């Protein structure tokens, strides 16, 4: 009897081990079957215009989807009416890049001296639902 009982115990342990492996393997399969969420990357992260003559200046940024699911840009806004920002594409597949064109016009607000403006980009990135890009410079009036 002792041999039969030991054999049953070994069989039960082996079966329990197989069940655990099956559960872990199934979880891993299901987990790996889900694509990574979208992830927004902005290059450069900020921009310094340096000395700005009393005229409109422009720059471009790259917006990249570094995630594994489509990135949806849900909004682009700025901190001041003297700054505009336009994105070329609002939907980016994984790995895709689009341009963000930003314009600052100091004449619209009568600006001079040090400036700090912000561009806000809202998206479906769960880690960064809103990204801020800082724009700096020194406006020099004629």
Image (tube, helix red, strand yellow):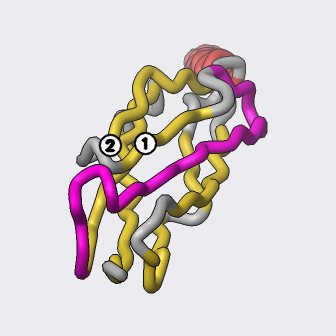
Mark 2 touches mark 1? (CB < 8 Å): yes
Residue 21, position as x, y percentages in the image: 65, 25
Q: Which of 19 and 10 is in front in this view?
A: 19
Residue 112 - label: none
Residue 115, position as x, y percentages in the image: 27, 71
Position of residue 23 in the picture relative to residue 93 (left or right): left
Residue 6 visible, this angle = no
Residue underneath mark 2: 78
Looking at the image, is mark 2 or mark 1 earlier in the sequence? 2
The answer to whether residue 99 is above or below residue 53 is above
Residue 83, position as x, y percentages in the image: 37, 48
Classed neighbour count for the residue bearing mark 1: other residues with Cα under 10 Å, few (<14), some (14–19), many (≥20): some
* Secondary structure state at the residue bearing disc 2: strand
Query: Residue visible at 48% across and 59% down?
Result: 56
Position of residue 92 in the picture relative to residue 103 (left or right): right
- Assess whether residue 26 is covered by the magenta stretch: no
Query: Residue visible at 25% across and 79% down?
Result: 114
Residue underneath mark 1: 84
- Assess whether residue 110 is covered by the magenta stretch: yes
Range drawn in magenta: 91-113
Residue 140 visible, this angle = yes
Query: Residue visible at 66% across and 51% down?
Result: 62
Q: Nearer the viewer, residue 104 or 75?
A: 104
The answer to whether residue 43 is above or below residue 54 is above
The answer to whether residue 50 is above or below residue 99 is below
């Amino acid at each position: 009897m002792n041999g039969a009982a030991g054999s049953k115990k070994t069989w039960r342990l082996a079966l329990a081990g197989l069940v655990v492996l099956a559960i872990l393997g199934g979880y891993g399969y299901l987990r790996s079957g889900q694509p990574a969420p979208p992830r927004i990357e902005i290059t450069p992260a900020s921009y310094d215009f340096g000395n700005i003559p009393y005229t409109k200046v422009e720059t471009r940024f790259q917006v990249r989807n570094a995630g594994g699911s489509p990135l949806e840009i849900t909004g682009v806004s700025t901190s001041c009416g003297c700054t505009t920002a336009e994105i070329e594409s609002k939907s980016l597949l994984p790995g895709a890049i689009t341009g963000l064109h930003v314009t600052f016009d100091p004449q619209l607000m009568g600006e001079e001296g040090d400036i700090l403006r912000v561009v806000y980009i809202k998206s479906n990135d769960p880690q960064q639902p809103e990204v801020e890009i800082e724009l700096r410079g020194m406006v020099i009036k004629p």
